[in-house]
Amino acid sequence: MNEFDKNSASKALFKSQTVDKDLKRIGQLQRATHEAGRNIYSLGFGLLFLLGVWLFAYLKSDGDGSLILIAAAVIGGYMAMNIGANDVANNVGPAVGSKALTMVGALLIAAIFEALGAIVAGGEVVSTISKGIVSPESIADADTFIWAMMAALMSAALWVNLATWIGAPVSTTHSIVGGVMGAGIAAAGFGAVDWPVMGAIAASWVISPLLGGVVAAAFLTFIKVTVLFKADKISAAKRWVPILVAIMATAFSAYLMVKGLKRIWKPDMAMIAAVSVSIAFLTYFWVRSRVARAALMMENKRKSVSKLFTVPLICSAALLSFAHGSNDVANAVGPLAAIVNAVNDGMVSAKTTLPFWVLVIGALGISVGLILFGPKIIRLVGEKITKLDHVRAFCVALSASITVIIASGLGLPVSSTHIAVGAVFGVGFVREAITNRGGGIPERVAADKDARSVIDEGKLFKSWRKHRKRKLVRRQYVLSIAAAWVVTVPASALLSAALYFGIQFVRH
């Protein structure tokens, strides 16, 4: 090739690279523009929802307290939207990350079951002051109590909104607890707070993610050893997958009875055990027949076996959403219901009746927030922390239900958000540890032993050694999420106290 040809080739290559870079920049600009447009639309629809809450509350309120009730209803709707935007991701994120559900499918399932859980099993009576943090007797004046609850609700909503914006899944329960604590201290002093309860909540910052991570890691290790690392994966799957899904069915049955339906049905331990065992047997025999039929057309590969967990993952996303809606709707409507009752009755009580219209605001708010703003945290939990397949996502969902049951039995305070995210970290670190110890080589060589004539095992080993050096869990999320968890209660408490003092300053 002469000098002219070389120069022409270099210019052509440079031009091609320049065009590729320009196209890449255009693509990035288009994605950024699309994202900005979507954010504007989401914000607009969110404001429309709050306007609808304002009109709805206006029609429901009357008398001197109408403006207070309307303001409280709008703040409660805002808090419910933030719960949907942040907290619900833990229920459907693993299913989306593993591709068992599309984002649209996950949003629809979660929105429907969150609303059903809130309306059907949200309960008629809620604690006016979340988790018994502040004694009602310490804030006996109804006027002071109303403004304290307004400050608590607003601070929790603002904190969860900030956490969603920066991409940190946080506990909405901890947020409202911090808000109530801060407003309680501002209104009645440090003596109003039940500090042993606060200590137990602080302990849950450590207990929840550790329990979730250990349980999920244990199940993932078990599945790898008993199924995925076996030469005959189909036979192993026929033996163990029905048992594993039956364990999940048992766990979710108990989970729903212990947590999801606790406000409308309180069965004793004998009833919980009987129902759970019955469902376990029915699930086992049904899944066994389904796996046996699927095995006839199944390839002896890990990916094929993983597909067996698709339906359990979809069911778990729906059941977790139902249980979450029935429990965490109280974080939005509990303080709101307390304000409504204090305004109408002119007094403060430890328990209060929950008006149905208040429950509807919470249920719809969670679903609206999920659809409009939920995808960001869903992607973080399901895709960005570590790569999830069907098996890993199954272990995360199973861990979420089992850990709550264990903690409830031991009387330990735990956060479902911390459990689910801890479980994602747990399966990620197990995957990383097995890979670093060469766990991928036996599995891949065994799967390809019939094709060794066409596979260069030297190249396979070299590729594996390169893969071995990779970190399979993004460390940046470990630190950022842990930091968000630790500061949630104090941050929402400080914000709540500041809002309460600000309200009092404006009023006086």
Image: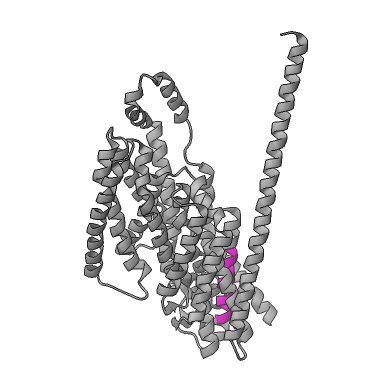
Report which quarter residue 224 is drawn in: top left
Q: Is residue 45 above or below residue 290?
A: below
Q: Is residue 239 left or right of residue 131?
A: left
**Considering depth in this image, is 25 or 329 the residue closer to the camera?**
25
Q: Is residue 460 above or below residue 273?
A: above
| Residue 470 screen position, x and y as percent | 48, 33
Q: Is residue 103 above or below residue 275?
A: above
Main SS of residues in magenta = helix
| Residue in the picture at 36% in, 19% down | 453
Q: Is residue 174 above or below residue 397?
A: below
| Residue 354 screen position, x and y as percent | 46, 81
Q: Which quadrant of the figure contains the N terminus?
A: top right
Q: Is residue 46 left or right of residue 110?
A: right
The residue sitting at the top extreme is 2
Can residue 491 be seen at all in this image of the molecule?
A: no
Magenta extent: 146-159
